[in-house]
Image (tube, rainbow, N blue to C red):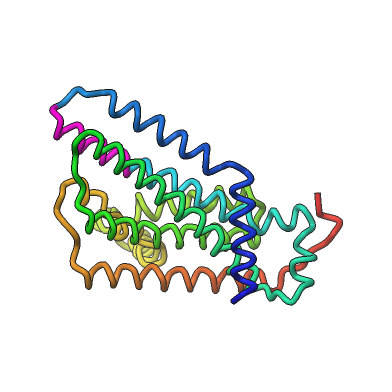
Amino acid sequence: MLRIRTIAWITWLEVIRRKDVYVLLILLGTLLVTLVSLDVFGLGGVVRYITDVGLLMAWTFSWILAVSVGARQLPQEEARGTVFSLLAKPVSRIEAVTGKWLGAWGIVSSCTLLFYVLVIGVVLAKSGTINAAALLQGYILHVIALGVMSAIAVAFSTRLSHDAAASVSYVVTGAAFLVVPRIPEFMAQEPGFRGAFLMFLYHALPHFEVFDMRKRIVQDYGPANGITVLMVALYGLVLMALVILVAWLAYRKKLFSRTHIG
């Protein structure tokens, strides 16, 4: 466990050094400042609009960061040749994979917290309110969803280059969030083999929509049932474990050649 934490901490330092986080924070801040300057509705309407769009941007930016950081870690080690020294130490491949994923997940979760704080700050500055309990539940489930996204990116990066892994991860996670919830509608129009294939995708791909509490927060419905939130959280943790297991199985027999280091 100590080795996993060490790898995760090194991942943190590398991401901070690359300044990806600061770019995303500047983008979010710029967009939110633009939003609050457009006082075209009544105060309540503006605050609700700011909350909705602000949380949407927090989801979008954190998704981009999760995939980008997760897909970069292992290919980066291979490209620099540091993978040899990493695995030459008493570090198993499951520890390397888990440590890289944990570091990516941790930095993305911390950035997401900053995104939320920025959104809350703007809403409060406009004399708006947010249900704290619902917001906390939304953040926790959001972070768990990011853990799954980061794990998917790391899993693809075990066999693909950084760019390829990121591209495939964006497609898979984006489809899981936007398309999977609508598959039951499509199945009614696609009998036979196509319907069976859609059913397979419906059960195989993650259901990220269950982690999204933005509507509940924006509409001020209050916190969700605790048992329901716990079940969704457990679903996410199981998904993480399964994806990391697949990543390890794909990485444990991978061969490295110094002639391909560039």
Q: Is residue 233 above or below residue 261?
A: below
Q: Quadrant of residue 134?
A: bottom left
Horizontal and vertical percent position of residue 151 = 51, 62
The range drawn in magenta is 42-55
Q: Residue furthest right?
A: 259
Horizontal and vertical percent position of residue 105 = 50, 59
Q: Nearer the viewer, residue 26 or 141?
A: 26
Give the residue drawn at x 59%, y 48%. Answer: 16
Q: Is residue 83 among the parts visible in the rendering?
A: yes
Q: Is residue 142 above or below residue 28?
A: below
Q: Is residue 96 left or right of residue 238?
A: right
Q: Main secondary structure of the magenta part?
A: helix
Give the residue drawn at x 55%, y 71%. Answer: 246
Give the residue drawn at x 29%, y 60%. Answer: 210
Magenta-colored stretch includes residue 49: yes
Horizontal and vertical percent position of residue 67 = 52, 51
Q: Quadrant of residue 120?
A: top left
Give the residue drawn at x 26%, y 54%. Answer: 135
Horizontal and vertical percent position of residue 19 = 59, 41
Q: Nearer the viewer, residue 193 or 16?
A: 16
